[in-house]
Amino acid sequence: MDRIKRTADYYQLLIDKFAKTGQSPNQLRVYKEIKELVLSCSSYEEIQQKMKSGGYYESPGQALYMDKMMALKKAAQINGFEELAKIYQDRYDEVKADFNKMYEIGYSDKVSAFMAKQSNILNAFYEIYNNYLNHKSANVFDLLYKSSLESIRENYNKLNSLGTDFRSVSGDKYFRHHIILSDADYMIFVSEVESFVTKYEADKSEIQNFNEIAEIAWGILKDKKSQIQEIGRSENAKTKRSVFMAVPPADISGKYEFMSNEQEEF
């Protein structure tokens, strides 16, 4: 009986541990059941027989796995990942129905696919932020001014291809925490990125329309090259070249003088 009591005391220690944390309800349940089983037996051999027939050699591992799935589900929900939380819930239900499902790894592919997608979304969002800073710090004559705007548009569209959009991502607290800006500056960032992309698309459309008109005009004019050149020579003969000069005043209260001088042809 001493051996049975010591075994029961061991399971009581496990019960106390899991009751204290409150994070492992399945393990708590299983060890309570095992303790009751132990105390119902009169010999150690009977304990072994009942544990084997009752599946209690497997159930602690099953319970541990189920508690792990619940912990992962909770972490996913805290981060706002409801899709990932559902993956863990589905896995929990599978293992609860059949402990052999613990040894199947198919669900991990779903988790990996989700995490890869989240990583791609975060990378695209962070690229938008980095290029936003580059664009704001560059002047209009800097090559970075235009290239950063193009990169913003490219990653903005990449979010759409990943099944989301900039507005949804920027409003997600998980992605928001990756951008080191005050709430006020963050709102400006989101608003200006939207306006950058809208203006970029409008400018792009205007340039495309201009190119189309220029292509039509060139189609009309290219066969009249000699006639146009002749008109140019005729009009040029009627003109005179002049040099214009601005002469500054002698003091701050004076006025500029402007001079024009016609040039004689040599």
Image: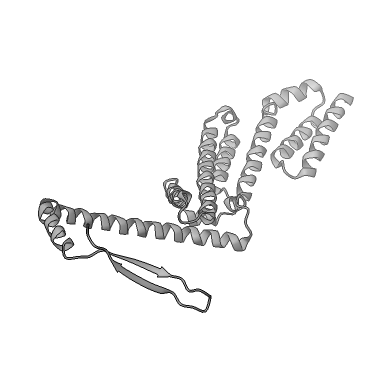
Query: Considering the image in quadrants, where does the N terminus appear?
Result: top right
Q: Residue at x 72, y 41 (%)?
A: 24
Residue ID at (72%, 26%): 50
Q: Is 67 placed left or right of 158 in the picture?
A: right
Residue at far right of view: 2
Q: Where is residue 140 drawn, in percent x and y?
A: 46, 56
Q: How many marks?
A: 0
Foreground residue, 235 or 115? 235
Is residue 30 shown above or below 235? above
Q: Position of residue 203 (x, y in %)?
A: 36, 58
Say which residue appears at 89% left-offset and 25% top-offset. 2
The residue located at (86%, 24%) in the rendering is 3
Q: Nearer the viewer, residue 9 or 21?
A: 21
Q: Residue furthest top?
A: 45
* Residue 160, percent from left and from top: 43, 49
Is 44 situated left or right of 242 in this image?
Answer: right
**Where does residue 35 sit, x and y in percent of width and height?**
79, 33
Q: Is residue 18 above or below residue 58?
A: below
Q: Residue furthest bottom?
A: 253
